[in-house]
Structures are given as C-alpha cells and as structure tokens.
Image (tube, grey):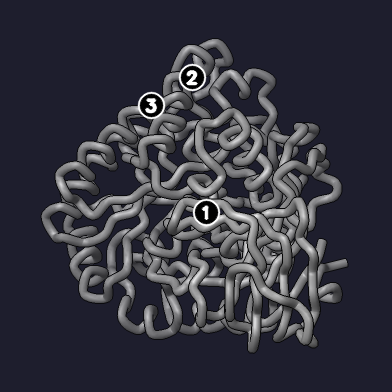
C-alpha cells in the first residue's frame, strides 16, 4: 500500500520544541515553527494558547527545509515495472525528501513539453514536488538540441542527457548558450565513451583480479575538464553529476577558484564504498560511475568538507529483481537510494564530525535549490512551507523488504544507521511516518 492514504490536508499547524536546522545561517536552535495558510508564518518562541490548529511537539526531533534530491530516476513513462512516479515519491517520502528531480532517460525520452507536462500531471496530487529535468538533445542521441525554451515553460528545471554525455563539444556549446539565456544549468554525465568502452566496474587491481572489463577514471576526468572549459567559454552554469574520482574533484576545485560557474554532486555510495565491495560480484554494487578506490573516496570526503562538492544526491536508479539477478557483466547499472540517503549522511558524515548537521542539510536543501532556481531549501517566512522532520538519534537497520520503492537493488541492506524520518509538510499536506 502506498503512503497517499496517510497524508492529511492541514493548512494550520504548530511545531513546538523543534531543533530547527537552518541551512542558510548554518545554525541549529530549539524553536517553534508556525504554519498558516500552508505558509511559514513564524519561527521562534510561540505561545500556543488560542491556536486552533494542529499542534505537534517535536521534542528530540530536528526540523529543516524539505530535502531535495536533484538526481533520481522515476522510470515513468516506460519503465513502470521498475518504479512509477507515485512509488518513487513514496520512496522519497520515506527517505525525508519533499522534492525530487527525475532524469529524462525515460521511454519516451523527456525531450518535449508533452512528456514534461505528463510528469507534472502525474505528480500534482502527491505530497512530493517533482521537478523534471529535460534532455539536452532529442532522444538523448547527442545530435540535435531539444526546444529548450518550450521545455522550461512546460516546467523543466535543468537539462541533461544523463546516462550519456553530450559528446560533441559544439553541441554542448550551443546547449550552454541556450541554457545561459534561460538561466538553467546543464547537468553532465561525464564519461568519454571512447575511453570507457563496454565496462562493468572501475579499471584497476580489482577488475584485473576478477577478470571484469573496467572503466578508467580518466574517462570521467577528460569530460569534466572539457565541460569546465566550455562553461568558462560560454559563461553558462555546468553541474557535474555523480562525481567519483579524486582528479575530477580537483578539476572542479580549481575551476571554482577561477570563477567558472561549476557545481557538482556526490552520491553516498561514492563517499562510502570502494571497488573492493565488488569482490563478491553482487550486482547491487554495480552502478555508473562505478565504485572507485579508497583514494577517490577520501577525495569525496575532502570535497564535501571544503565545499568543492556542493550537493549530496542519490542517483536513485530502480531495477527489477529479474534484471539484476544475472551475471555481473550483464546486469544493468544503478541502485536505489532515496530511503537510505539521510541515514547514511547522518551516520557517516555528521556522526564522525566530518560535517556539522547544518552543513550536511545544506547540501541536501539550499544547495540543490539554488542550483536549480527553486523557491525551496530555505526557512523563509511568508514562503510556502516545505519541511522535513527527523530524529537524528533514532537507530535503525536497513531492510530492503520494507522499502516503499518498487525496487530493492542497493548494497546497504543490513546496515545499522542513525537518523530516521518522522514527518513531512509540503503543499499544505502533512505526513507522519
């Protein structure tokens, strides 16, 4: 059963005794939060006497702007056996996200306004906001640009051929020039196909030991370097998707110092797991880009700490058991991530002190919202309320059988995590887990 039945329409609600995590001020403070007419009315010490709406005591719980995952695959249209927009949004809710951005590698491809409008219509009655990302090129074929202005008018918030790069630099230049006029980012899957070939994991010691075809880190780094140069030339915004190598992070770091409008994201699996995880050839450890080396993992953590890496996203990529239960080289790329991301971040980054709680939340709220020009990610009085409430101390064990997603393909089953969602408020709707 989906989560829709447990959602309630509530225009007025008072949250008391919350640990309010503010990603703008990078602060955390015990406060009350008042919602009226579905908008954030007041933050502070609020007297509840005379208030006729719902009151929720959040003692021991944290409250922050609604989490945003700017990189998911909801599979609809065309891949409904893996996920639908509704089940993907249920998974997002269970993970604490009030906003998700689905990539365009659907069937048909999200390369025309009708598909964007379909996605928006399918999600209009759900608690979670769905912000579609449209394709850069028609059918993601890399040859002909989509009608970007019409796609933005239909509701697209960015452009990407995710799953593939825009291989031709001339096409990318034209796309960036158009995107700059529209003030939207190009999101690049950085992989030089002439260097990657038909691969199954990271190229290195482990791939040679297992006899599996590998993709070298340079296949990512060459494209990151090129994309940065094209962005510098055009003055456009470029966002590097699922960054995974130490050299790629350093390229972004240096480009930022030069004033290039470049941002990037990392997935929990890329700052937690290495290629050694693939030794058992579990297809739930196969994703694109692949798990890399410990040196690369260390670079992801350093990039998160120094601000080079702006965003933590998931690349939530559902596949059915039938598709994943094959030999490693034949299995599709990708893992689901919406329901484990917050727990992994709180356990592995905030717990050890690598990031403060506000810093971590910033990378899942304010930063993605800013990159995509969304009126989200802040605790702004007067704005429509979008809130995530969670217990940062709640310990739980990952059990894929309990997932709300249609798919269960991920490598964290059985992990003990700290940090669990309590409730969400978005679009005038309240849901309590």
Which label sits on residue 364? Answer: 1
Mark 1 → mark 2, Cα distance in angstroms: 24 Å
Where, quadrant-wise, is the N terminus in this rendering?
A: bottom right
Query: Circle 1 — which element?
Result: loop
10 Å crowding of disc 1: few (<14), some (14-19), many (20+): many
Toward the viewer: 20 or 191? 20
Rate crowding at label 2 as few (under 14), some (14 to 19) or many (20 or more) other CA atoms within 10 Å: some
Question: In the shown orientation, is residue 432 left or right of residue 229?
Answer: right
- Of callouts 1 and 2, which one flags the residue occurring earlier in the amino acid sequence? 2
Image location (x, y in percent) of residue 217: 37, 28
Q: Are marks 1 and 2 in contact (CB under 8 Å)?
A: no
- The C terminus sits in image quarter: bottom right
Left or right relative to 166: residue 235: left
Q: Nearer the viewer, mark 2 or mark 3?
A: 2
Mark-to-mark CA distance, 3 and 1: 29 Å
Q: Residue at x 40, y 51 (%)?
A: 164
Write the residue at 52% across / 58% down: 22
Tell which of 145 and 228 is nearer to you: 228
Which mark is on residue 216?
A: 3
| Residue 53 position by quadrant | bottom right
Does residue 295 sit above or below 237 in this rendering?
above
Q: Which residue is mark 2?
A: 294
The disc, 2 or 3, on the residue closer to the chain's N-terminal end is: 3
């Amino acid at each position: 059963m989906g989560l829709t039945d447990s959602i309630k329409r509530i225009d007025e609600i008072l949250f008391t005794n919350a640990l309010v995590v503010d990603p703008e001020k990078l602060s955390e403070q015990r406060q009350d939060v008042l919602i009226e007419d579905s908008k954030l009315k007041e933050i502070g010490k609020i007297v509840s006497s005379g208030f006729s709406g719902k009151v929720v005591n959040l003692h021991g719980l944290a409250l922050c702007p609604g989490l945003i995952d700017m990189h998911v695959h909801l599979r609809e249209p065309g891949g409904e056996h893996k996920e639908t927009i509704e089940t993907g949004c249920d998974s997002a809710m269970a993970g604490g996200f009030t906003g998700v951005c689905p990539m365009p590698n659907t069937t048909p491809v999200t390369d025309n306004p009708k598909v964007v409008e379909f996605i928006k219509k399918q999600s209009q009655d759900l608690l979670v906001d769905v912000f579609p990302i449209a394709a850069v090129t028609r059918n993601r074929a890399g040859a002909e640009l989509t009608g970007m202005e019409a796609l933005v008018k239909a509701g697209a918030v960015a452009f990407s051929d995710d799953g593939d790069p825009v291989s031709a630099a001339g096409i990318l230049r034209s796309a960036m020039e158009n995107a700059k006029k529209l003030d939207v980012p190009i999101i690049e899957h950085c992989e030089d196909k002439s260097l990657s070939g038909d691969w199954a994991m990271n190229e290195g010691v482990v791939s040679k030991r297992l006899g599996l075809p590998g993709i070298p880190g340079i296949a990512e780094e060459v494209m990151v370097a090129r994309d940065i140069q094209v962005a510098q030339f055009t003055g456009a915004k470029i966002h590097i998707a699922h960054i995974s190598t130490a050299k790629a992070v350093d390229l972004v770091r240096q480009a930022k110092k030069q004033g290039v409008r470049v941002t990037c994201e990392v997935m929990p699996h890329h700052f937690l797991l290495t290629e050694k995880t693939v030794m058992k050839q579990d297809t739930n450890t196969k994703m694109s880009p692949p798990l890399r080396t410990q040196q690369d993992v260390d670079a992801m953590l350093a990039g998160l700490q120094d601000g080079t890496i702006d965003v933590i996203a998931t690349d939530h990529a559902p596949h059915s058991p039938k598709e994943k239960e094959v030999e490693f080289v034949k299995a599709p790329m990708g893992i689901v991530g919406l329901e484990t991301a917050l727990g992994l971040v709180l356990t592995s980054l905030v717990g050890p002190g690598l990031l403060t709680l506000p810093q971590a939340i910033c990378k899942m709220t304010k930063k993605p919202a800013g990159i995509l020009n969304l009126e989200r990610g802040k605790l702004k009085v007067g704005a429509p309320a979008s809130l995530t409430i969670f217990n940062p101390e709640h310990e739980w064990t990952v059990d894929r059988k309990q997932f709300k997603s249609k798919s269960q393909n991920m490598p964290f089953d059985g992990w003990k995590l700290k940090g669990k969602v309590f409730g969400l408020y978005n679009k005038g709707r309240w849901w309590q887990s």
